[in-house]
Every structure is written in structure tokens, then in C-alpha cells.
């Protein structure tokens, strides 16, 4: 039973304390901002303060802290009136507002005795403000100030001489609530040599930070303090509080210190201050041997100078972690320049950075189409492939002309990437654009194109396919061969009025299709309209190996394109492999946890997690350190192959692959 006369659940009170502490810390910062911008207060700031006080009021009332709820309610009324344009916040009101938050903090420090805090004067001053009058600044006159100062000293003395944990915490909180900034120098010494009690150190840190906000000159002085921990604390706060005069002191730390934590705090704050005088030092630290310091410097560099002419050579030479940090920094640059920079690096040699760049471009979407189209037309082979992959993910119909143009490229890999992208776009145009791919000289491209054609079939394409099948020429042979690798039941369903076409089609299908695809075709033929075709089907006998002739070995296929998964699954199911699938490396790892497999086949470039990232994680797991890994990708760069090998990939297979190539790779690894 509390002095409030109600039972308060300890766990509930703890949850209340945690939530309200966070809100009050934010309100303290908001009131500081409000004081600085008193002549032009943003409505968003007023709304945020109102919501914070409203939450404190409601939560305090819920746990039975009526005095606290009453004070928060009175403060909330002030900001409600401001929101409704009934009153305007004046500079003279801020002392009363700060006094209110201090009183709330004092109550929060000892909730069970919160009613002992006298809020009468504060409530009266808020009522006066709401009435449009000027409240009395303070009951205490200016002549009383020296007395107040003398009363403050005993608090510090008591703190320094006390050995009791609870008493020390209470004294710290009282120093903070009374804003005793003269205690800062003495308290800072305990940052350098902390107490044995962690809770006391936490409160001490919070108190010092609150007091330093009131005396920013102490923050700058602290950068020259002999203690490294004090310097690090002050270095951290210089950027947070935008102390522009601190740049030179921070640069001196970069020149003289070897402490990683102090250096990191100084670099971070220099970035937040965005002072051009730090550029040379930031560039130098961008190549520091410590990857965390390098990453921090690069991020600060991007914030300080989003000039792509300066950043470009730096970015090209950075290792993974700093380069990713720079990408975060580049978000502050001009949109057009950012897009150009990202597109110029779509085939970054590091697969992780490449994935992040691709994801950034996909998020930008439509504005990135034209720069990508230029790269698709004039880039090198790898850049064209990456540009096609990204364009396909944008799902914008106006990219069709660009992809159709490269679908006629002499390079099989570029054509394959173009058709991959075309099929990834939801549009009726997919049917027309993929039709030509059905007759490509590459079987993987034919299979890919027919898969998309099947998903988006139209009458015009059906008519063209029928006429070519009737000619029984090389084009007909290519269609039939692709049909053996794709369950093209929609297309065949549109050809049932031409039974003379089906004997050669069925012969090819029965010879090369997997059990799963054969069953899909069979289900079509069991329909009433297909009785004549079923007879043709049953009369065709082709000698093929049965799935039972093979071991039921399990294969995980990881690729971000459903069509590639479908094609690979068909090839493997045909000879009896059991397949599991995933759309990115992260999903692949989750599948492995549930379904141990005999081999993994993965793409390289995927969202969320690349194939190389997944391979590294697999190799770190003792359960999978010997699991065979095959990487299938459009990449042919030797650096990429080496990166894959370093990540633990056993075989590197280039798209588009032939079915026999894939099967030979699998069998060679499983036979070891």
C-alpha cells in the first residue's frame, strides 16, 4: 500500500518508470529546442510535446500517481491551447515549463512519495498563462540567489562523502532537478574512475549529460580534460548539441589520441557538425586499419561533403564496412547526383555492396530508369546484366523498349538477363516481348521465355506458335524442346483443336520432362475435351529412366527469380532429386534449419542476403561446413569467382546453363 492509498504493482510501476523516463528525456531536448526557436515554433514540435505530456498524464493516472498526473495535465493544457491558437508561447514562460519537467522528474525519481512534491505554485502559474497573463517568475527574489548557491554546495559535499548507494542516487537526481551546473567539474572525475555500483554510474552519466546541456562551455573544455573517458563523453556531446566551436579541439584529438572509442566519438561528431575544415582528416581516417574507425570517418565524410567528384575515388578504394557507411552518408546528397553515383557502381566488385546499391536504386525506382537505360545501352557486359536485373525489379512498363533492345544482343548472358527482367514485369506486353525468346538458339533462354509466355499467354502468341508447329521446322523443334522443360498446359490447352500437332510434342515431353511436369500435362489431358489427345499420349512409348532409379537426395535451390527456380526444379526433379527452394540467402538459411539437404545451389546477386553472404554463414556452421555449394550466376569476372571460392563455394556455374551441365556439377560433388 503506497502513501497514495492504493496498491501499486511493482512490475507495472517499473514499466511506467521506463516509458516515462524516455518521454521526459525527449521532452527536455524538445524544450531546449523550443527555447532556441521561440519566435517560430514548428507545429510538429508543439504536437510532439503535447503527445508526450498527454502520455505521462494518462500513465501516471493509471498507476495512481495523482499529483504527477495533475501536473502533466496542467502542462498539457498549455500546449493544447497553443495548438488551438488560443495562446502563444513566450520566452518568459519557458522557466515555468522547465520547472514543470524538473518537478515531474523529481516525482518519477521517487514515485511512492511523489505527492510530497509541492506543485501548487506551478499549477497556479500555468493557470495564469492560460488566462493570458504573465505569471510571477519565482517566489524567490534576486537577493535570495546567493542563499540558493550556498544551499547547493552541501548536496555535492554530501554526495562526495556518502557511502550509501540510494542516498547518492537521490543526491544526483536532486542536483539534476535543481540544475546545479557548478557540480559538473567534480562529477566528471567519476566518469574517469567509475563507482563499483553500475546503477550509480548510469544515474551519474545521465545527470552529467543533463547538466552539460545547460553549460555547453563545459563540454568544449572537457575535450582537453586529461581523462580519456571524459574526453570521449564530451566529444560525443559536441555533435549532438551542434557545438560548432568544438571542431578544432576534435581535430586535435584525431592528431594526438590512439584511443579507438575517443577517436570514433570525435569522427562521428565532426560528421554531425559538417565543418569543411575536417575534410582532410576525414579522408585520411577513411583508410584507417581499424574498420570501425574507417566506417565512421566515411560516414562523416559523406555528411560533411556530399560532393561526388571528391567521394568517387574514395569509394572505389574502400573495403566493405567503410563503403557501406559511405552509402549511408550519400543519402544526404542531391537526388540526381546520388542516382548517378549509385548506377555508376551497380557492378561493384563486392557482392554485399552491390546488393545494397541495387536495393537503394530499386527503392528510388522511377527516377533511376533513365540512368539505368544508359548503362544498359553503353555499359560493359557486367554492367548491362546488372542494369537489366535492377530494371526488372522496378516493374515499370516504360522500360520494355530498353530491355527488348538488349534481348537481341549477341552475348547469351546479356540476352538471358534481358528476358529475366522482361518476365519480372507484370504486363500484357510480356507475352509479346517474350515470344521471340521462344526461338532463341539457347535452350535456357527458350525455356525462360516459354515460362513467361505460359504465364502471360495471349491469342496472338498462341496463333504464331501454332503456325510454327504446323510447319514442323527448326522453330517447331525449339518450341517442343522448351515445352519439355516447362509445364505449358495453358498453351497446349489452346491448341486442342489441332490434334495433328501433338504426337511430336508428346514424344519430346515424355522424353525430357520431369515426373512433376508429366503429371501436370497428364491432368490437362484428363479433361473431356482432350480424350483424343489422351489416346495419342498413351500410345507414345519413350524409354526414360525412372525417378526410382536415383537416390532421393535433397537439393536446396536459392534464387530471387521464381522462373529460374522453376526451371532448375524441373531439371532436378526429372532425375529424382527432391528439391527445396528459397528466394534469397536469408530464406535459404531458414530452410536449411528445417530441412537438412545434400547440396545447395544458389544465385549470387539477390536482395536481403547475397549468395556469397549465405555461403559464408553456412561455412561458419559446424553442421554445414562440408555441405557442397554450387553458385549459378551471370557473373564471369575472375574476381567474382575468387570471392565465391573464398566464401566456400565449390563450383561456380555461369548462367545460362545447360541441364546436363548442372547435373554433372551436382553428381561430381555428391560422388566425392
Image: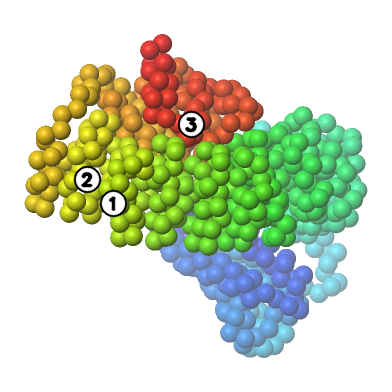
- Mark nearest the camera among 2 and 3 is 2
Distance in Å between CA atoms under marks 3 and 1: 34 Å
604 vs 428, left or right, is right
Residue drawn at 56 percent across, 58 percent down: 365
- Regarding residue 95, the answer to whether it shows in the image is no
Residue 125: % across, % down: 66, 79
Distance in Å between CA atoms under marks 1 and 2: 8 Å
Tag of residue 501: 2
Are the two marked residues, 2 and 3, in contact with CB atoms closer than 8 angstroms? no
- Mark nearest the camera among 3 and 1 is 1
Label 1 packing within 10 angstroms: few (<14), some (14-19), many (20+): some
Helix, strand or loop at disc 2?
Answer: helix
Tag of residue 466: 1
Residue 158: % across, % down: 74, 46
Q: In this orientation, which residue lies closer to the viewer: 142 or 614?
A: 614
Residue drawn at 74 percent across, 36 percent down: 318
Quarter of the figure that contains the N terminus:
bottom left
Amino acid at each position: 500500500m503506497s502513501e497514495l492509498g492504493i496498491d501499486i504493482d511493482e512490475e507495472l510501476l517499473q514499466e511506467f518508470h521506463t516509458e516515462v523516463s524516455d518521454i521526459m528525456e525527449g521532452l527536455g531536448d524538445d524544450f531546449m529546442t523550443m527555447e532556441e526557436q521561440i519566435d517560430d515554433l514548428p507545429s510538429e514540435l508543439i504536437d510532439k510535446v503535447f503527445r508526450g505530456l498527454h502520455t505521462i498524464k494518462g500513465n501516471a493516472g493509471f498507476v495512481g500517481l495523482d499529483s504527477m498526473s495533475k501536473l502533466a495535465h496542467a502542462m498539457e493544457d498549455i500546449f493544447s491551447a497553443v495548438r488551438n491558437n488560443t495562446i502563444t508561447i513566450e520566452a518568459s514562460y519557458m522557466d515555468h515549463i522547465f520547472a514543470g519537467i524538473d518537478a515531474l522528474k523529481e516525482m518519477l525519481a521517487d514515485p511512492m512519495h511523489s505527492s510530497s512534491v509541492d506543485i501548487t505554485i506551478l499549477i497556479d502559474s500555468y493557470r495564469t498563462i492560460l488566462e493570458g497573463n504573465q505569471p510571477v517568475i519565482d517566489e524567490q527574489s534576486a537577493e535570495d540567489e546567493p542563499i540558493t548557491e550556498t544551499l547547493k554546495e552541501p548536496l555535492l559535499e554530501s554526495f562526495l562523502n556518502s557511502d550509501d548507494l540510494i542516498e547518492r542516487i537521490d543526491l544526483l537526481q536532486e542536483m539534476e532537478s535543481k540544475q546545479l551546473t557548478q557540480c559538473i567539474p567534480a562529477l566528471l572525475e567519476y566518469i574517469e574512475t567509475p563507482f563499483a555500483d553500475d546503477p550509480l554510474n548510469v544515474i551519474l552519466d545521465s545527470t552529467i549529460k543533463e547538466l552539460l546541456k545547460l553549460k555547453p562551455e563545459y563540454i568544449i573544455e572537457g575535450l582537453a580534460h586529461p581523462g580519456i573517458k571524459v574526453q570521449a563523453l564530451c566529444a560525443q556531446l559536441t555533435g549532438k548539441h551542434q557545438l560548432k566551436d568544438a571542431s578544432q579541439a576534435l581535430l586535435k584529438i584525431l592528431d594526438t589520441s590512439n584511443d579507438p572509442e575517443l577517436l570514433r566519438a570525435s569522427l562521428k561528431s565532426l560528421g554531425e557538425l559538417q565543418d569543411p575544415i575536417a575534410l582532410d582528416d576525414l579522408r585520411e581516417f577513411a583508410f584507417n586499419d581499424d574498420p570501425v574507425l574507417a566506417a565512421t570517418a566515411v560516414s562523416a565524410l559523406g555528411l560533411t561533403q556530399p560532393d561526388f567528384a571528391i567521394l568517387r575515388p574514395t569509394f572505389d578504394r574502400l573495403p566493405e564496412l567503410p563503403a557501406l557507411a559511405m552509402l549511408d552518408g550519400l543519402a544526404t546528397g542531391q537526388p540526381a547526383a546520388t542516382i548517378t553515383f549509385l548506377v555508376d557502381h551497380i557492378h561493384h566488385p563486392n557482392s554485399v555492396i552491390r546488393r545494397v546499391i541495387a536495393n537503394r536504386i530499386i527503392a528510388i525506382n522511377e527516377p533511376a530508369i533513365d540512368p539505368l537505360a544508359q548503362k544498359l545501352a553503353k555499359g560493359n557486359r557486367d554492367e548491362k546484366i546488372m542494369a537489366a536485373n535492377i530494371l526488372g525489379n522496378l516493374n515499370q512498363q516504360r522500360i520494355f523498349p530498353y530491355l527488348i533492345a538488349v534481348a537481341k544482343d549477341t552475348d547469351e548472358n546479356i540476352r538471358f538477363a534481358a528476358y529475366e527482367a522482361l518476365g519480372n514485369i507484370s504486363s500484357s506486353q510480356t507475352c509479346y516481348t517474350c515470344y521471340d525468346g521462344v526461338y532463341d538458339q539457347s535452350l535456357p533462354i527458350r525455356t525462360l521465355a516459354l515460362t513467361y509466355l505460359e504465364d502471360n499467354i495471349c491469342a496472338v502468341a498462341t496463333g504464331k506458335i501454332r503456325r510454327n508447329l504446323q510447319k514442323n521446322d527448326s522453330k517447331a523443334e525449339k518450341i517442343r524442346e522448351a515445352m519439355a522443360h516447362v509445364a505449358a498446359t495453358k498453351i497446349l490447352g489452346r491448341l486442342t483443336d489441332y490434334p495433328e500437332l501433338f504426337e511430336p510434342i508428346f514424344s519430346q515431353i515424355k522424353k525430357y520432362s520431369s515426373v512433376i511436369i508429366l503429371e501436370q500435362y497428364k491432368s490437362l489431358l484428363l479433361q473431356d475435351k482432350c480424350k483424343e489427345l489422351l489416346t495419342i499420349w498413351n500410345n507414345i512409348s519413350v524409354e526414360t529412366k525412372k525417378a526410382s532409379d536415383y537416390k532421393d537426395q535433397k537439393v536446396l535451390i536459392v534464387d530471387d527469380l521464381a522462373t529460374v527456380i522453376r526451371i532448375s526444379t524441373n531439371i532436378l526433379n526429372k532425375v529424382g532429386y527432391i528439391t527445396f527452394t528459397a528466394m534469397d540467402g536469408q530464406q535459404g538459411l531458414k530452410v536449411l534449419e528445417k530441412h537438412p539437404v545434400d547440396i545447395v545451389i544458389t544465385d549470387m546477386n539477390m536482395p536481403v542476403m547475397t549468395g556469397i553472404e549465405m555461403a559464408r554463414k553456412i561455412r561458419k556452421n559446424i553442421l554445414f561446413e562440408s555441405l557442397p555449394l554450387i553458385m549459378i550466376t551471370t557473373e564471369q569476372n575472375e574476381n567474382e569467382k575468387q570471392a565465391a571460392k573464398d566464401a566456400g563455394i565449390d563450383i561456380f556455374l555461369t548462367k545460362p546453363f545447360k541441364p546436363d551441365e548442372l547435373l554433372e556439377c551436382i553428381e561430381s560433388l555428391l560422388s566425392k
